[in-house]
Image (cartoon, helix red, strand yellow):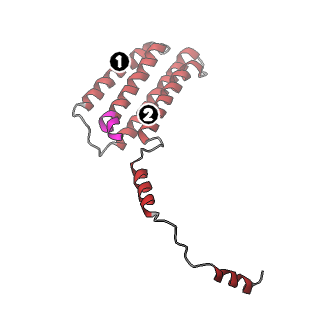
């Protein structure tokens, strides 16, 4: 096609095409529904909780499989250290995330301190018996309870709906 023929074809079509009906009502409704629709992607809380749970699981499993000079004691201590490090990291992330957000209760820090005291007692017991899987699992559960507490007092499930 030559340039003149193209220009002639362009001139045959209207500059604007009007829709057969008013579409704005449907567009506004779709936008309104989209803004009220719950998010399908995981929230930061869900991702942190999933990462925490996975970390605890990995640390507990690592106790059984980490190679070391004295496999029973050294791998247990390495697994416990990994568990503690992971917990501390996630706790720091949560506290930083909720730094400026008000808590729903005033005594949550005391509850957190009570759970931490229980965790310290278990860690002291693990110093004497580092291959005790029950104590390691209990420590992981206590750490998870602390992370859950921080989440629940700052971002309860009923607020996310």
Residue 115 vertical placement versus 132 (above, below):
below
Q: Which residue is mark 1?
A: 121
Q: Which residue is mark 2?
A: 49
> Mark 2: which secondary structure?
helix
What x and y, as percent, mark residue 76?
A: 52, 19
Residue 20 vertical placement versus 94 (above, below):
below
Of the 4 image quadrants, the one containing the C terminus is: top left
Residue 59 left/right relative to 100: right
Query: Contact (CB < 8 A) between labels 1 and 2?
Result: no
As drawn, the residue found furthest toward the front would be 20
> Mark 1: which secondary structure?
helix
Residue 145 left/right relative to 58: left
Q: Residue at x 62, y 78 (%)?
A: 13
Mark 1 vs 2, N-terminal side: 2
Residue 6 sits in which quadrant? Answer: bottom right
Instruction: From the image, state whether disc 1 or disc 2 is nearer to you.
Output: 2
Mark 1 residue crowding within 10 angstroms, few (<14) / some (14–19) / many (20+): few
């Amino acid at each position: 096609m030559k340039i003149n023929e193209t220009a002639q074809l362009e001139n045959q079509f209207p500059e604007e095409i009007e829709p057969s009906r008013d579409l704005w009502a449907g567009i506004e409704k779709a936008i309104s529904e989209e803004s009220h629709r719950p998010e399908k992607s995981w929230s930061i809380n869900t991702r942190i909780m999933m990462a925490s749970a996975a970390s605890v699981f990995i640390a507990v499993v690592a106790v059984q499989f980490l190679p070391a000079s004295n496999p029973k004691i050294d791998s247990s201590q390495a697994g416990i250290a990994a568990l503690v490090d992971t917990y501390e990291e996630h706790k720091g992330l949560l506290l930083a995330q909720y730094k400026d957000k008000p808590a729903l209760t005033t005594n949550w820090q005391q509850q957190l301190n009570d759970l931490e005291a229980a965790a310290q007692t278990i860690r002291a017991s693990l110093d004497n018996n580092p291959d005790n899987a029950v104590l390691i699992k209990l420590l992981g559960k206590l750490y998870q309870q602390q992370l859950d507490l921080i989440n629940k007092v700052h971002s309860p499930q009923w607020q996310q709906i």
